[in-house]
Amino acid sequence: MVYQLRQYHIHAGQMGQWLELFHEHIKPLHERLGIPIIGAWQSSDQASFIWIRGFDNASVISSTEAAYFAAPERKALGDLPQKLIASMTITVMTDGLQNDRPN
């Protein structure tokens, strides 16, 4: 499995609106499409939202994201997510502990 670590800097004063959007729209759509959200956190200063989602392998990320953006639920959101996010960093990761596991 591979993961995306998604770090978003949310515009000042917009974290509440972002959290509502995430929990009411983004997370349910991910669940419907079979994209597991491993975890989500917000910084104590309300400036950053960090979440991790998983994929079977790196080769499916592009097609899975295309399906996400093509979904009617996502299209209905328009550019609202982008208006709330000041900047983002996305890092693709693999399980760093996998080699530490006993055979």
Image (cartoon, grey):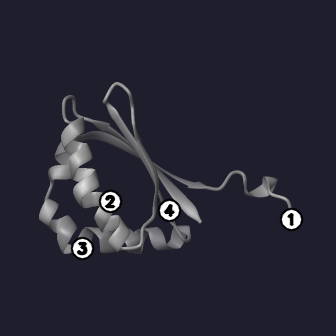
Q: Distance between the residues labelled 3 and 2?
A: 16 Å
The disc, 1 or 3, on the residue closer to the chain's N-terminal end is 3
- In this rendering, the label closer to the viewer, 3 or 4: 4
* Residue under pointer 4: 54
The disc, 3 or 2, on the residue closer to the chain's N-terminal end is 2
* Residue under pointer 2: 27
User: How many numbered marks have been drawn onto this rendered protein structure?
Assistant: 4
Q: What element carries label 3?
A: helix
Measuring from the top left, give residue 86's x and y in whole percent. Answer: 25, 38
Q: Do the residues labelled 4 and 1 touch (CB within 8 Å)?
A: no
The disc, 1 or 2, on the residue closer to the chain's N-terminal end is 2
Relative height, residue 43 to residue 55 (above, below): above
Q: In which quarter of the image is the C terminus?
A: bottom right
Most distant residue in the top direction? 45
Most distant residue in the right direction? 103
Relative height, residue 58 to residue 12 (above, below): below
Q: Are marks 1 and 2 in contact (CB under 8 Å)?
A: no
* Residue under pointer 3: 70
- For the residue pair 93 and 25, the one nearer the viewer reads as 25
Q: Distance between the residues labelled 3 and 4?
A: 19 Å
Relative height, residue 12 to residue 1 (above, below): above
The disc, 4 or 1, on the residue closer to the chain's N-terminal end is 4
Residue drawn 32% across the image and 74% down it: 67
Q: What element carries label 1?
A: loop
Residue type at mark 4 is Gly
Residue type at mark 1 is Asn
